[in-house]
Image (spheres, helix red, strand yellow):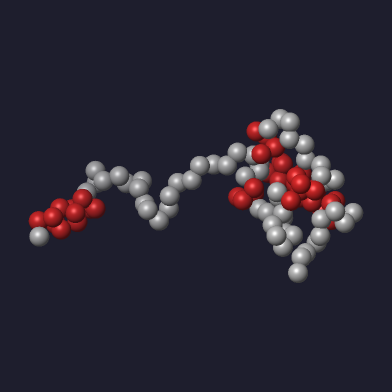
């Protein structure tokens, strides 16, 4: 019985880690793959590179998934759209 009271008091105790919330685990910020690797070349003609930024349905992945910075995410979008135009990448897959 005393153990239950102690556990309950620990939850309400201000010394308990206030930032800890098991529902919202802090994740590490992703590094932009283009900024971090100086040798990385984003080219719309390179299918292997383009597939990393497109899901299996052909949609462009968002920044939170790719980890790209806003500048390079715009470059990715332009490159994917160019690859779609010249039929290297499909617009959609069935």
Q: Position of residue 47 (x, y in %)?
A: 80, 48
Q: Is residue 85 visible?
A: no
Q: Is residue 63 visible?
A: yes
Residue 37 drawn above or below residue 63:
above
The residue sitting at 24% across, 43% down in the picture is: 15
Residue at the top extreme of this rendering: 38
Q: Quadrant of residue 68?
A: top right
Q: Position of residue 77 (x, y in %)?
A: 76, 50
The residue sitting at 74% across, 60% down in the picture is: 58
Residue 56 vs residue 3, the one in the foreground: 56
Q: Position of residue 37 (x, y in %)?
A: 68, 32
Instruction: Tally the numbered discs.
Output: 0
Image-based side of 5 in relation to 56, left or right:
left
The residue sitting at 66% across, 39% down in the picture is: 33
Give the position of the C terminus as an image quadrant. Answer: bottom right
Give the position of the N terminus as an image quadrant. Answer: bottom left
Q: Position of residue 29 (x, y in %)?
A: 54, 41
The residue sitting at 21% across, 50% down in the picture is: 10
Residue 20 drawn above or below residue 84:
above
């Amino acid at each position: 019985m005393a153990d239950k009271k102690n556990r309950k008091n620990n939850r309400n105790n201000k010394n308990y880690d206030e930032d800890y919330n098991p529902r919202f685990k802090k994740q590490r910020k992703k590094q932009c793959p283009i900024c971090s690797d100086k040798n990385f070349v984003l080219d719309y003609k390179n299918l292997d590179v383009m597939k990393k930024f497109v899901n299996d349905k052909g949609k462009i992945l968002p920044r939170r998934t790719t980890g790209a910075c806003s500048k390079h995410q715009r470059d990715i979008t332009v490159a994917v759209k160019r690859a779609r135009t010249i039929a290297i990448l499909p617009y959609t897959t069935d």
